[in-house]
Image: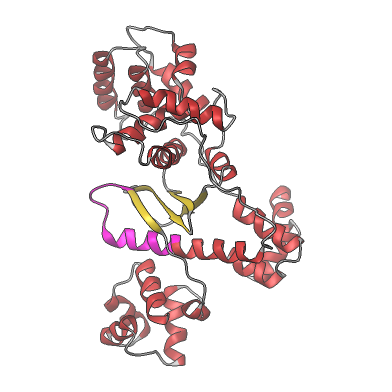
């Protein structure tokens, strides 16, 4: 148990064995032995290691363990393994707290809705064009209609998908990942990404859940998930209502307004216009080149779409506290804050102080 947790904490910190050894004043060989499980640190070194890795000493001996399975990363090819290790450590730590929290709830109470897909989805999808109907089926099955989805995180959480936001600095080389914990679907997104990119990642990972074992061998799953994501966020019917059925050209301002109404990037809206037949592929290609000359493929103009955040975990901590499933100390521990900070937050003192400033 100790060796596995120690290794995870070290990788999550981004420190090499040598860097950690130097920080605590021991040899790199000792660190190696700790990770291989052939030695244990003394009490004094354990305190130093915990401090250097920014964890509590009890973290190394925590009995609860979870496995994140079926992991698929949405990352750049150049993403360093060190960044992926840090993300993996952060995700597992958050997932463990999630699992511990859920275990406090009585078996008769299910605080998270079991994930399920509409029964009307097709068994086989053999063309990318068919994904337009698949996205509409998902929206109808979940009662979303064709209007903008104002909160993707809340929408997915209400349907039984666990969302984890990681604050690990990734230099924008990581968008998200999907997997499952004890058969519960999990999607991880980076807080460093813009709001519209977060939303596209969420829709893309939903695509994996929807399209799994449904695509014919001729279709590329990543391409299909991208198409599904665009159609789910901005349905063709809604797009045509805004832009018209057939256009020879589009104004950048039209794409900008779509971005802020539907929470989808201008570039993705441009692709959707081509996929929906509003503009020709050549027009889309020409505008894509123009976007590049303007520098908009790197950073789109105007106000960015706001980030999304998850509140479900925190809500369930307070719900468990209110129902006496957990005590105050455990609530503070689950939220990763000190008791004094938790007392202030619980009494809304932080909000009151902000309102008076």
Q: Is 304 in the magenta?
A: no
- Principal SS element in the magenta part? helix
Q: Is 87 in the magenta?
A: yes
Quarter of the picture holding the N terminus: bottom left
Query: In this picture, which residue range is highlighted in magenta?
Result: 74-91
Model colouring: secondary structure
Q: Residue at x 57, y 24 (%)?
A: 145
Percent position of residue 231, x then y: 42, 26
Percent position of residue 208, x then y: 39, 41
What is the quadrant of residue 35 in the picture?
bottom left
**Does residue 347 appear to the left or right of 263 in the view shown?**
right
Q: Residue at x 50, y 76 (%)?
A: 59
**Does residue 198 appear to the left or right of 155 in the view shown?**
left
In the figure, 337 relative to 115: above or below? Answer: below
Q: How many marks?
A: 0
What is the quadrant of residue 53 in the picture?
bottom left
Q: Nearer the viewer, residue 12 or 130?
A: 130
Q: Residue at x 69, y 51 (%)?
A: 354
Percent position of residue 163, x then y: 51, 50
In the figure, 206 relative to 165: above or below? Answer: above
What is the quadrant of residue 209 in the picture?
top left
Residue 181, can we see it? yes
Residue 149, can we see it? no
Q: Nearer the viewer, residue 338 or 103?
A: 103
Percent position of residue 125, x then y: 35, 30
In the figure, 102 relative to 276: above or below? Answer: below
**Does residue 318 appear to the left or right of 307 in the view shown?**
right
């Amino acid at each position: 148990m100790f060796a596995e947790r120690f290794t995870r904490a070290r990788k999550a910190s981004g420190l090499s064995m040598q860097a950690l050894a130097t920080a605590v004043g021991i040899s790199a060989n000792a660190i190696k032995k700790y990770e291989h499980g052939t030695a244990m640190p003394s009490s004094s070194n354990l305190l130093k290691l915990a401090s250097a890795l920014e964890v509590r000493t009890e973290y190394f001996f925590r009995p609860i363990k979870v496995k994140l399975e079926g992991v698929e990363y949405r990352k750049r090819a150049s993403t360093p393994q060190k960044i992926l290790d840090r993300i993996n450590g952060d995700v597992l730590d958050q997932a463990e707290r999630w699992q511990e929290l859920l275990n406090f709830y009585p078996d008769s109470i299910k605080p998270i809705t079991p994930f399920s897909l509409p029964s009307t989805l097709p068994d086989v999808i053999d063309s990318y064009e068919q994904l337009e109907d698949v996205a509409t089926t998902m929206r109808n099955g979940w009662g979303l209609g064709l209007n903008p989805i104002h909160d993707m995180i809340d929408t997915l959480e209400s349907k039984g998908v666990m969302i984890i936001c990681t604050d690990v600095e990734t230099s924008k080389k990581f968008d998200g990942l999907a997997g499952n914990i004890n058969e519960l679907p999990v999607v991880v997104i980076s807080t460093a990404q813009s709001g519209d990119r977060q939303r596209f990642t969420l829709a893309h990972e939903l695509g994996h859940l929807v399209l799994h074992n449904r695509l014919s061998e001729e279709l590329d799953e990543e391409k299909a998930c991208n198409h599904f994501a665009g159609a789910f966020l901005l349905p063709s019917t809604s797009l045509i209502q805004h832009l018209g059925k057939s256009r020879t050209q589009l104004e950048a301002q039209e794409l900008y307004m779509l971005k802020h109404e539907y929470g989808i990037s201008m570039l993705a809206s441009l692709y959707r216009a081509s996929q929906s037949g509003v503009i020709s592929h050549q027009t889309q290609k020409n505008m894509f080149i123009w976007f590049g000359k303007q520098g908009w493929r790197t950073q789109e103009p105007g106000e960015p779409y706001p980030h999304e955040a998850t509140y479900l975990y925190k809500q369930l901590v307070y719900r468990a506290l209110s129902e006496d499933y957990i005590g105050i100390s455990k609530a503070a521990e689950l939220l990763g804050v000190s008791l004094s900070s938790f007392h202030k937050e619980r009494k809304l003192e932080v909000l009151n102080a902000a309102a008076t400033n």
